[in-house]
Amino acid sequence: MAETAETSVQDRAPRNGVFRNGMEYVSWGRGAKSLLFVQGGPGSVVPQGALRGLLRRELDPYLAAGYAIWIVTRRRNMPESHTSADMADDYARLIAEEFGGRVDLVVAESFGGMIGQYLAARHPESFGHIAMVVTAAELSAWGKDVDHRMAAAVASGDPGGAGTVLAEYVLPGPRTRWLRELLGPALGRRVLGRTGCPAADVLTEARAELAFDARAVLPLIRRPVLLLCGGRDAFFPRAAAEETARLIPDCTLIVYERWGHVRTVFSRRVPRDVLAFVGSC
């Protein structure tokens, strides 16, 4: 029993590193199955501090199911014109070079889900199953505005300003502006802190997000897709998620009726539904 417990602790300890192409990662677990987690944005980092703790709890059910989990950042020093489709190509090359050409499961979240749509359409051979969480064929006008302001604050080295925008994710509207301004600096330091992502890359992702519209490529997806969304998500409204599901030939859509973007992201129902989807295919 002692050996089993020690092995479990070792398997759940984070491992940080950098792949040969410069994409950074943190990994947990040594299971036989591989899970590539494509995180949101704009900007991608190896999570630290409070953010790492939140993600670790979010991903724990996959560890229990026997997956080795890899959170991998985007490329560094991307060209200014790099698109979500280009970023999908980057992940496909990474899978080919570092994972033997295939991962068992891709979980792509928010902006990462935008990239995941192109990964599914252009590189279906690179994964066994794919789940897209709180994403859709296009970001809402409000989402584009708030993410652009967040990216500008992060890129300018202003974590307090970025934190104030981040608070808008859960406290939108003019009535709570005073509270966002009060909480923002502390939130920015705690959750964002030192991003570790070059400012130019944050802005490149923001531009890619503003230009994103995957409607033309979604019908090209030939693999089963699980799409999970919040019924009250202001970034990817339910109507956009439903349209996305209709455009993908084989898509299972799950809507968490009363949930917004952030609550859906950190819900333990998401991994439960993803694992059920994998088990049913």
Image (cartoon, rainbow, N blue to C red):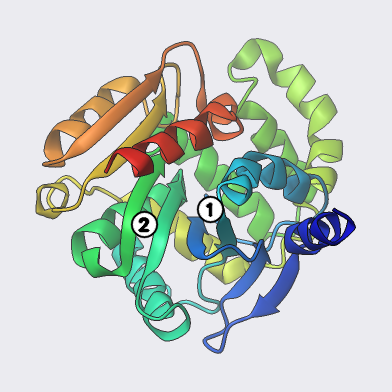
Q: Where the C terminus falls, by quadrant? A: top left
Mark 2 or mark 1: name the one nearer the start of the chain.
1
Most foreground residue, 241 or 159: 241
**How many residues crowd around disc 2 within 10 Å: few (fewer than 14), some, or many (20 or more)?**
many
The amino acid type, in three-letter code, at marker 2 is: Ile
**In which image quadrant can residue 193 be found?**
bottom right
The correct choice, above or below, for 183 with respect to 173 in the image is below
The answer to whether residue 56 shows anywhere in this view is yes
Residue at 26% x, 22% y: name it: 239
Q: Is residue 158 left or right of residue 247?
A: right
Q: Is residue 132 left or right of residue 34?
A: left
Q: Are marks 2 and 1 in contact (CB under 8 Å)?
A: no
Residue at 70% x, 40% y: name it: 57
Q: Which residue is label 2 attached to?
A: 115
The correct choice, above or below, for 258 with respect to 243 in the image is above
The answer to whether residue 81 shows anywhere in this view is no
**How many residues crowd around disc 1 within 10 Å: few (fewer than 14), some, or many (20 or more)?**
many
Q: Is residue 39 left or right of residue 160?
A: left
Most foreground residue, 38 or 147: 38
- Label 1 residue SS: loop
Residue at 59% x, 30% y: name it: 268
- Label 2 residue SS: helix
x, y percent for residue 207: 41, 57
Q: Which residue is label 1 attached to?
A: 39
Most foreground residue, 130 or 199: 130
Residue at 25% x, 32% y: name it: 252
In the picture, the disc for residue 174 is none
The amino acid type, in three-letter code, at marker 1 is: Gln
Most foreground residue, 237 or 224: 224
x, y percent for residue 168: 63, 28
Q: Is residue 194 left or right of residue 171?
A: right
Q: CA distance from mark 2 to mark 1?
A: 10 Å
